[in-house]
Image: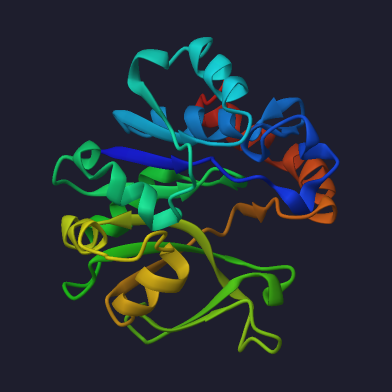
Amino acid sequence: MRAVLLAAGFGTRLRPVTDRVPKALVPVDGRPLLEYWLHSLFHSRFEEVLINTHYLPDQVNELVANSLYRDRITVVHEETLQGTAGTIRQNAAFCADAPCLVAHADNLCICDFNAFQAAHRARPAAAAMTMMTFEAPDPTQCGIVKCDGNGLVQEFHEKVANPPGTRASAAVHLMEPEVLHFIERMESDTPDLSLDVVPTFLGRIFAWHNDRYHMDIGTLQTYGMAQIDIRAQRAFMEAQGWFS
């Protein structure tokens, strides 16, 4: 399976941390966020990863050039931001008409990605994608989901003032070719996954809950929380062999 890591954003809410470093490379416990993604995915039977860049791209290029996995990583630069779904559309050939993981690489995600893939394979027949969810510390800053008894997402509330719960989209999706072909046909200049794709597939998105750890590194507050929280995940990461 292949993965697309969205890493082109400016990270304006994380300034001044992101004044000199792209958001996907901010360090957590001394390691850039992107390193967590690369180690976790390549230790979970993912074959190739595509990373998009825009803001301070040379730093991402340098990290990839020095990575153990550099021969399995493709970096694509966007002179103009394409939108989260636009990046997928622009690189449709990368997924090669097979299921593909799409994730925001500026989040800290610690979980069993093999279990996530297994859940996707065992999803209800109606589902065309599987969405990772997590318990949001501030649900007003996330996309909150409500599921039916089969685990299919029926409602999606993106950053609303009074969300109906705390279970949120982790912005990590396993997509079947049907979804990728839908994105490929979208006419918007900068289509967005949360605003334009997820609402279209309500009732056909299976939810898999990450009960280990996920944090949206969107603000200085959540960034600080992640620096503390990550210490409790070291044993899990060592057992998975992520950094060995």
Image side of residue 9 versus residue 91, left or right: right
Give whichever of 82, 71 is nearer the camera: 82
Q: Residue at x 42, y 59 (%)?
A: 190
Q: Nearer the viewer, residue 18 or 82?
A: 82
Q: Is residue 244 visible?
A: no
Looking at the rendering, in which quadrant would you find the C terminus? top right
Q: Is residue 83 above or below residue 96?
A: below
The residue positioned 35% from the left and 13% from the top of the image is 71
The spot of residue 66 in percent (x, y) is 53, 10
Q: Is residue 37 left or right of residue 20?
A: left
Res 64 visible: yes
* Residue 234 picture quarter: top right
Q: Residue at x 42, y 15 (%)?
A: 70
Q: Is residue 74 above or below residue 81?
A: above
Q: Is 65 on the left-hand or right-hand side of 131?
A: right
Taking the image as shown, residue 223 lies to the left or right of residue 168, namely right
Q: Which colouring convention does the figure follow? A: rainbow
Q: Position of residue 175 (x, y in %)?
A: 28, 56
Classify residue 135 by image quadrant: bottom right
Q: How many marks?
A: 0
Residue 54 percent location from the top left of the image: 54, 36
Q: Residue at x 61, y 36 (%)?
A: 55
Compare residues 143 and 109 and report the one nearer the observer.
143
| Residue 163 on image: x %, y % | 64, 86
Position of the N terminus by quadrant:
top left
